[in-house]
Image (cartoon, grey):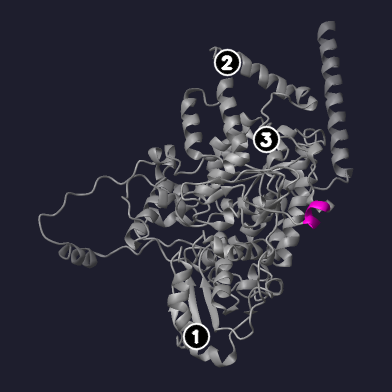
């Protein structure tokens, strides 16, 4: 009995303590002044990674400038006799520019060059991606939706006469299609404009141009026209400035990335549906995305854009370097280079075909993968767009089912007998495949026309690409997922690489050879995530070479014939002779690929504006295993190196 009574007292004591604890917690909850805050990806990133993003010693082997290119400086000023344009021009040129951000930028540069060539007055070009959009903000006109009109006109006043619109007595004739309109090819020669368009211009006084392929003048001009090449650089890198709201928000994004105290790398996947369809890379994707790429490829074949077969081996195209590097592969390459998992990577590009699913492996390797939505609030992005009339959201409507009479009529018109065999069982359509803009492919064989919301989103992509362009140019390192694709269209990565080369040639800009990278990835396919040390050294050697002279020569061979702005050397640069004497490198056609830059003016060599600091840089080709002391003390680095050594079981004579 005594034992039972003791148990009762113990149980009563435990219950009393539990009741008291519950009362205390309820009181704390009731009188607490803590308020809930809305989740912010930007604040969460800085909070979650505050312990690893602390300022420290920068690893120059990963972030330092390329010493061998420090002597190259931007210099696009005229160097020969270059008169101011005559007020009595031969007439007016107006143009409609179709395409995305990269096509618009390249087309405008060519239009200014053509106007100078023909001694014509250029009317501010119309950007069709904004004019076709339904009810975008009334605050902006076509050109001013993206660029600063006033700065554009003022910067080129010594090069070309530019007006905002045609004179009044010409507007009525233009509305009635009273002037000749031309649709020049992507690589039209200067002789085409002088022989075909100039006579019409002098006669009619107004000529219209429709530009759809991203360029209307051949990329490589004769050496005698080097001043026209420099004009292209002045337009692209000086005159074409984004409107102030875009510039302010873009710089704010860069400041927020810098505020974490670490350098950052910009990466553009280059996964665009049209480009993937052009090169036949459908099999690199899965499910509905493969079907969408093939549908677009069939359209290109019917339109004459592509003269290839519909079905090709995408894996062979990948090994040939014709397909983009997938985000997972880029992550492996960056790890092989030595970038730690805490590296800040900015994901550029207004759209990545395949969606977030393709980015999951890259996010697993690099937790600090951010984009514009991580750095900007919804209010900042909506303010950039401006006030717009609300539109109904896109709702895909299933085609109206056919009645029995319609089915019989279709059967009677189906063609000669014998009738074909019944179709095989349809593939099961999963619910997630009916979500998003691609829902149409599960219900119909014909892609619907763009909805008003689709057209508006296309205009918005110009703004998102402009923000990404600013961040990518200012990044400490840039890695392209797809450039030099051979399609002849300008690409986003190529324009970024060209401007980085122009503004600061020694900036860390990777120019990988996708064919070589594909061979390296295939060679270690069985141990992709646990490569041997010899493989990582091969990756480092290739990517380090792509940073300097070897990468520039390859860029000149592959990229410059399609887009001059992707490689504006040697026309738009000068060299400080006191730093390096370089012998010119010429190609098989006699064209100078590297090293024929003029000597910089004395005021550039003597002033402190050059910004060459040999003591703060380290050669990109120096592939030593010396690592900063901070990284050696990092337990993650030590464990990764030990596991790498443990995995390298097979002795290699190259190690």
Indicate whether 430 appears above or below 172: above
Percent across and percent down for residue 620 are 67, 35
Residue 605 in the magenta stretch? The answer is yes
Question: Could you say whether the residue bearing mark 2 is in a helix, strand or loop?
Answer: loop
- Given residues 338 and 71, the one toward you in this image is 71
Whole-number angstrom distance, CA of label 2 to CA of label 3: 26 Å
Q: Counting residues from the N terminus, which is met first, the one under dot 1 or under dot 2?
A: 1
Percent across and percent down for residue 160 are 63, 75
- Determine which residue is flagged by label 1: 202
Image point (59%, 62%), residue name: 226
Quarter of the image with the N terminus in it: top right
Whole-number angstrom distance, CA of label 3 to CA of label 1: 54 Å
Question: Could you say whether the residue bearing mark 1 is in a helix, strand or loop?
Answer: helix
Query: Which residues lie in the magenta part?
Result: 602-606
Whole-number angstrom distance, CA of label 1 to CA of label 2: 73 Å
Quarter of the image with the C terminus in it: top right
- Given residues 9 and 515, the one toward you in this image is 515
Observer-side mark, 1 or 2, equals 1
- Given residues 335 and 437, the one toward you in this image is 335
Q: Residues within 10 Å of mark 2 (few under 14, many from 20)?
A: some
On the picture, is 74 further left or further right than 593? right
Q: Quadrant of residue 553?
A: top right
Whether the residues at callouts 3 and 1 have beta carbons within 8 Å, the answer is: no
**Outermost residue, bottom side:** 169
Q: Residues within 10 Å of mark 1 (few under 14, many from 20)?
A: some
Q: Which mark is residue 620?
A: 3
Q: Residues within 10 Å of mark 3 (few under 14, many from 20)?
A: many
Image point (52%, 91%), residue name: 172
Whether the residues at callouts 2 and 3 have beta carbons within 8 Å, the answer is: no
Residue 306 in the magenta stretch? The answer is no
Observer-side mark, 2 or 3, equals 3
On the picture, is 568 further left or further right than 258? left
């Amino acid at each position: 009995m005594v034992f039972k009574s003791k148990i009762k007292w113990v149980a009563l004591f435990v219950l009393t303590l539990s009741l008291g604890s519950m009362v205390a917690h309820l009181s704390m909850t009731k009188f607490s002044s803590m308020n809930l805050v809305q989740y912010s990806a930007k604040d969460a990133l800085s909070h979650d990674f505050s312990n690893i993003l602390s300022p420290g010693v920068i690893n120059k082997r990963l972030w330092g400038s390329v010493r061998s290119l420090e002597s190259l400086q931007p210099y696009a000023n005229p160097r020969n006799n270059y008169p101011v344009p005559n007020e009595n021009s031969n007439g007016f040129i107006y143009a409609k520019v179709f395409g995305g951000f990269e096509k618009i930028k390249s087309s405008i540069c060519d239009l200014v060059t053509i106007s100078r060539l023909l001694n014509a007055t250029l009317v501010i070009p119309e950007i069709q991606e904004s004019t076709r959009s339904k009810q975008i903000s009334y605050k902006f006109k076509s050109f001013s939706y993206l660029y600063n009109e006033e700065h554009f006109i003022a910067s080129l006043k010594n090069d070309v006469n530019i007006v905002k619109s045609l004179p009044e007595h010409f507007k009525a004739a233009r509305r009635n299609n009273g002037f000749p309109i031309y649709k020049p090819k992507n690589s039209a020669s200067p002789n085409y404009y002088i022989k075909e368009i100039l006579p019409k211009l002098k006669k009619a006084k107004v000529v219209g141009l429709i530009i759809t392929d991203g360029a209307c003048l051949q990329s490589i001009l004769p050496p005698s026209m080097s001043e026209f090449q420099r004009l292209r650089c002045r337009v692209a890198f000086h005159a074409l400035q984004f409107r102030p709201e875009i510039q302010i928000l873009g710089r704010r994004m860069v400041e927020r990335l810098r505020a974490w105290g670490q350098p950052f790398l910009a990466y553009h996947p280059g996964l665009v549906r049209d480009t993937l369809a052009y090169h036949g890379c459908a099999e690199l994707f899965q499910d509905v995305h493969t079907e969408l790429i093939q549908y677009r490829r069939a359209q290109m074949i019917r339109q004459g854009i592509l003269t290839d077969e519909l079905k090709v081996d995408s894996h062979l195209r990948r090994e040939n370097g014709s397909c983009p590097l997938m985000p997972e592969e880029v992550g492996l390459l960056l790890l092989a280079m030595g970038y730690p998992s805490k590296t800040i990577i900015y994901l550029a590009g207004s759209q990545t075909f395949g969606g977030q699913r393709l980015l999951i492996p890259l996010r697993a390797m690099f937790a600090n993968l951010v984009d514009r939505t991580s750095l900007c609030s919804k209010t900042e992005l909506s303010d950039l767009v401006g006030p717009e009339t609300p539109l109904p959201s896109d709702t895909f409507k299933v085609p109206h089912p056919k009645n029995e009479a319609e089915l019989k009529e279709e059967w009677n018109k189906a063609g000669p007998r014998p009738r074909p065999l019944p179709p095989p069982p349809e593939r099961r359509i999963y619910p997630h495949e009916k979500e998003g803009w691609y829902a149409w492919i599960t219900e119909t064989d014909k892609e619907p026309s763009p909805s008003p919301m689709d057209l508006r989103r296309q205009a918005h992509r110009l703004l998102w690409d402009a923000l990404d362009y600013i961040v990518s140019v200012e990044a400490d390192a840039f890695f392209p997922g797809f450039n030099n694709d051979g399609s002849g269209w300008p690409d986003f990565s190529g324009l970024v690489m060209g401007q980085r080369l122009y503004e600061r040639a020694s900036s860390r800009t990777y120019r990988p050879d996708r064919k070589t990278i594909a061979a390296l990835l295939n060679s270690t396919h069985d141990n992709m995530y646990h490569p041997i040390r010899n493989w990582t050294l091969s990756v480092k050697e290739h990517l380090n070479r792509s940073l300097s002279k070897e990468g520039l020569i390859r860029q000149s061979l592959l990229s410059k014939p399609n887009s001059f702005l992707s490689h504006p050397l040697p026309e738009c640069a000068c060299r400080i002779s006191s730093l390096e004497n370089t012998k010119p490198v010429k190609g098989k056609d006699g064209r100078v690929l590297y090293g024929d830059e003029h000597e910089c003016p004395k005021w550039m060599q003597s002033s402190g504006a050059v910004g060459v600091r040999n003591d703060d840089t380290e050669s990109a080709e120096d592939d030593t295993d010396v690592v900063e002391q901070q990284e050696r003390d990092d337990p993650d680095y030590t464990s990764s190196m030990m596991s790498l050594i443990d995995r390298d079981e097979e002795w290699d004579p190259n190690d």
